[in-house]
Structures are given as structure tokens and as C-alpha cells.
């Protein structure tokens, strides 16, 4: 293994539809701790499992602009400072964001290796994962574009497959030339693939030198390469984020890395990866990788289930009592409950689509909404009032703002608060409160070392989040 720097590119887009109601548009699955033995999210674990790889660098992360502060906070909390956080104005599959990130990595380093990872994978055998990545370095250093094929364990119809030109020796980490990619097959075809050691699942993880990759992009798609460079150059810096230029980005096709590059290049090499991999694609896959009782049931949270088989039952808060259940997925969040047959898990995305089309807010939005300063949780509401629990991180503050249509009461329940109301300051401790009249210019801050929690009661004829006029904001929001 050489001394080339390895820069991770972590793809962190997604709409949060397949693991509803836990995952939603405002908080996709990669930002949740799903079936993890620790308290880290899928995104955090994607980064943490890299720490023992030789010559690994801080990552480039690419995400939706609406999730930028979630990404920044989750990286900060594990003491990682990304090289760059690119903000996509909208999704464009994987080819364009990988190209943009590779251009950035190449500009700032001397032809580094790049390791492309999805933020929503789960890997249980970290040692085997690291060994396989490091085995791929010699191929990538020689100019190959390496992908990691997951050793299949059942005839999956939800994954794409990679066919190598020769069979794998599963006891020997040897890269093989790629013959063909196959999209999600039917069950009979998947059963045939399982018998043939030339086939592995397509993980969507890649390793290559930026020069090798960018040369191939220029060979196949010179116009797209130029557009991606312009999208970087015309983009804007926003605090710690790099906004990709929207007018340029919309010109790139909605195409995957596999279709654009791997199906066209002669440089493709596949390495078998046997490391307890799962892409956590739906609730059935969560159940498959979960610990189970003797009846193949898996439970999480406030759950009692008896005389049941093959079930996954999860509660975030309220008690779920099940009796005589069979082959079901039951997931209860703070504001919604999903009950679906295991065989229908892949169709949860269609439920979210239906809820969205009917303008049912639970389809897209969580009760818990993240902001750069912390988060708030909606507790209760009616037409002219609502109650929220607000948490403010140490050293952070809300914007200096006013509301035209509502007044607010704040009660400190934990920590200490600095409050500004119409240029007057006051400091509140636990159980103390204050009142903000409609139209008053105000700000809530936490200058202390412990998190601040307050209960906010809003009252007025309109309570929408767009009733905010900002005068000053440390996060650059309008």
C-alpha cells in the first residue's frame, strides 16, 4: 500500500420515504440511529468506521441544503471537521455529486484516492471492511476504478448485481475485472445468481484515483464535466457550506455513477466484501439485521408482544401491546403508526407519496424539527395556539426576530437562558418565565456550557413558521 491520501466522499441525499414514519423528508434515515448498537446515526457510523484506514482524510460530504445543519452538527458531535459540505439544490442521482466532489478533491490535493460511500449503509464487521478497502488501494493506485461487491447471502431482488469475468475465491481478497451489471432481477434470476460465484450485490461503494476517474468522465461526458466544474465555480460559500450553483446543476442528467461510468469503462474492478453489509433499504431489511427471539421477532422500545412470529415492532414512546401477530412490521413514532406486512415493506414509499399528495403533513414532516441552534418538538396545538419544547445547544442562539401575528410565553425547564426583548436583556433560570408581546423584537440565547430547554406557548391568529422577520442571524438565514 502506498502513501496516497484517501479522501472519503459521503453521499447523504435522500427523501426519507422507505423507513417512514421514523424517516421523513425533513429527517431521512441516514440522520437516525437505526438498529445500531451505539447511539450514533448511520451517517456518523459511516464516518467512524473509517478512522483506522491508513492515510484516511476528513471527508467531503454532499447533502440536501435543507439538511445542512443536521450534517454539520452530527459531524461536530463526533469531532470531525469535513473538508467540504456541498449543498445540492435538488437531487441528481449519484454521478453528478461524485464528479463535483472528485473535482474538488483533485484541486486541493495531488491526485488523491477517493472513497465513495453511501451514508445509509450498516456494516457489522468493521475489521473485514477495512481490510477490503485497503486491499482495493493497490488496484485504485494502478488506475483501476474499484467497486466493492457484497457477497450475497440470499436471492435478493431489491439489489443490482455485478458479474465478474472470473469466479471469486472468497478466501482470497483479489480484484477481478467486471463483465456486466444487472439491475434488480426477478426471483428466478436472483436464485441463479446466488449459485454462481461470479455474482455479487452492487454496494454502490467505489475507490479510485481522481485522475483516472476524471479522465473517464472527460472521455464519455466532456460536457457534463464542464458543467460540474462551472457548478462549483459559480457556487457560493455559506458559512461552512458550499452551495452548488442551481442554474448549472439543473443541466446535468439524472444518472447514476454505475450507469454513467461503470457500465462504460474498461477500468472496472470488483472486490468481494463480506462484512455484514446492509443498505437498510426498508423495514424488512431492518428486521433481517436485528437481534431476534426464538420466534424470529424483533422489538424496540415500549413493546410487549406475545404468541407472535416473524415481526418487527418498534415504539418511540407509547406502549404497543401485540397478541397473535404474524409477519408484520409495526412502527410507531411520536405522531404516526405504520402497520404493514413484511412482504409489503418495499411499498412504504408509496404510502408516503399518497400522504404527500393528500397534503397530510405527517407524510413529510416530523414533530421534531432541527435547526442550526438546536431543535424544537411540537407538543400540542389547536387553531390559535400551540406548545413547543425548544432545545438550544450551548453557545448558540436563535435569530433576532419578531412575529406579526403571534405572542409567546417562554418557561425555562432546564438550563439557563439569556433573553432580549425590545433591546432589554434578562437572564432566566429553571422555572422562571417571560412574555414576548406580538410585534416585539426578541432573541433567545444560551451562552452557557449546558443545553437549554424551554417550553414555548404561542398564541395568535396565525402560527406558521413563515411569520418570522429576522434582523440578525449568526447562521446567515434571511
Image: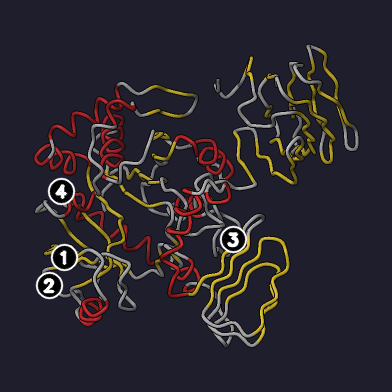
Q: Residue at x 56, y 79 (%)?
A: 292
Name the image quarter holding residue 151: bottom left
Sooner in the amino-acid sequence: mark 4 or mark 3: 3
Q: Which residue is mark 2?
A: 166
Front position in the image: 28 or 383:
383
Q: Which residue is mark 1?
A: 176
Name the spot of residue 406 as percent of width and height, x first.
74, 26
Q: Look at the numbered discs 2 and 1 and tell me whether their residues touch, using CB distance below 8 Å.
A: yes
C-alpha distance separating marks 1 and 4: 14 Å
Element under disc 3: loop
Sooner in the amino-acid sequence: mark 3 or mark 2: 3
Name the spot of residue 238 as percent of width and height, x first.
46, 24
**Could you classify mark 2 by the number of other residues whose Cα lies within 10 Å: few (under 14), some (14-19), or many (20 or more)?**
some
Q: What colour scheme has been applied to the protein in the rendered image?
A: secondary structure
**Could you classify mark 3 by the number of other residues whose Cα lies within 10 Å: few (under 14), some (14-19), or many (20 or more)?**
few
C-alpha distance separating marks 2 and 4: 20 Å
Residue 355 is left or right of residue 198, and the answer is right
Image quarter hosting the N terminus: bottom left
Name the image quarter holding residue 381: top right
Amino acid at each position: 500500500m502506498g502513501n496516497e491520501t484517501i479522501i472519503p466522499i459521503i453521499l447523504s441525499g435522500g427523501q426519507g420515504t422507505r423507513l417512514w414514519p421514523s424517516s421523513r423528508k425533513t429527517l431521512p434515515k441516514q440522520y437516525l440511529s437505526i438498529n445500531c448498537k451505539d447511539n450514533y446515526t448511520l451517517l456518523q457510523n459511516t464516518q467512524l468506521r473509517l478512522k483506522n484506514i491508513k492515510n484516511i482524510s476528513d471527508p467531503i460530504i454532499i447533502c440536501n441544503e435543507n439538511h445542512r445543519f443536521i450534517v454539520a452538527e452530527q459531524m461536530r458531535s463526533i469531532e470531525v471537521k469535513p473538508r467540504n459540505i456541498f449543498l445540492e439544490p435538488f437531487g441528481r442521482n449519484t454521478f453528478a455529486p461524485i464528479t463535483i466532489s472528485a473535482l474538488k478533491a483533485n484541486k486541493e490535493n495531488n491526485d488523491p484516492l477517493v472513497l465513495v460511500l453511501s451514508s445509509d449503509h450498516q456494516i457489522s464487521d468493521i475489521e473485514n471492511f477495512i481490510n477490503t478497502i485497503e486491499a482495493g488501494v493497490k488496484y485504485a493506485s494502478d488506475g483501476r476504478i474499484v467497486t466493492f461487491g457484497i457477497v450475497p447471502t440470499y436471492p435478493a431482488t431489491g439489489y443490482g448485481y455485478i458479474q465478474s469475468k472470473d469466479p471469486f475465491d472468497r478466501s482470497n481478497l483479489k480484484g477481478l475485472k467486471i463483465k456486466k451489471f444487472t439491475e434488480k432481477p426477478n426471483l428466478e434470476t436472483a436464485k441463479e445468481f446466488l449459485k454462481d460465484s461470479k455474482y455479487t450485490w452492487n454496494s454502490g461503494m467505489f475507490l479510485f484515483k481522481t485522475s483516472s476517474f476524471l479522465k473517464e468522465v472527460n472521455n464519455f461526458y466532456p460536457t457534463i464535466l464542464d458543467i460540474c466544474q462551472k457548478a462549483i465555480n459559480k457556487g457560493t460559500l455559506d458559512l461552512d457550506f458550499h452551495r452548488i450553483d442551481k442554474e448549472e446543476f439543473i443541466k446535468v442528467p439524472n444518472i447514476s455513477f454505475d450507469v454513467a461510468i461503470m457500465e462504460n469503462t474498461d477500468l472496472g474492478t470488483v472486490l468481494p466484501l463480506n462484512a455484514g453489509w446492509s443498505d437498510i433499504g426498508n423495514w424488512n431489511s431492518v428486521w433481517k439485521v436485528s437481534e431476534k427471539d426464538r420466534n424470529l421477532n424483533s422489538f424496540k422500545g415500549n413493546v410487549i408482544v406475545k404468541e407472535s412470529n416473524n415481526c418487527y415492532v418498534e415504539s418511540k414512546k407509547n406502549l404497543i401491546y401485540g397478541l397473535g401477530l404474524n409477519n408484520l412490521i409495526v412502527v410507531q413514532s411520536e405522531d404516526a403508526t405504520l402497520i404493514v406486512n413484511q412482504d409489503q415493506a418495499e411499498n412504504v414509499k408509496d404510502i408516503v407519496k399518497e400522504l404527500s399528495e393528500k397534503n397530510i403533513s405527517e407524510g413529510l414532516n416530523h414533530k421534531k424539527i432541527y435547526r442550526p441552534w438546536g431543535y424544537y418538538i411540537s407538543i400540542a396545538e389547536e387553531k390559535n395556539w400551540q406548545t413547543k419544547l425548544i432545545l438550544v445547544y450551548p453557545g448558540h442562539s436563535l435569530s433576532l426576530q419578531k412575529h406579526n401575528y403571534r405572542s409567546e410565553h417562554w418557561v425555562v425547564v432546564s438550563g439557563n437562558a439569556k433573553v432580549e426583548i425590545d433591546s432589554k436583556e434578562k437572564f432566566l433560570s429553571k422555572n422562571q418565565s417571560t412574555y414576548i408581546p406580538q410585534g416585539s423584537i426578541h432573541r433567545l440565547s444560551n451562552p452557557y456550557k449546558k443545553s437549554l430547554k424551554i417550553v414555548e406557548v404561542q398564541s395568535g391568529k396565525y402560527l406558521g413558521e413563515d411569520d418570522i422577520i429576522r434582523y440578525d442571524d449568526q447562521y446567515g438565514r434571511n
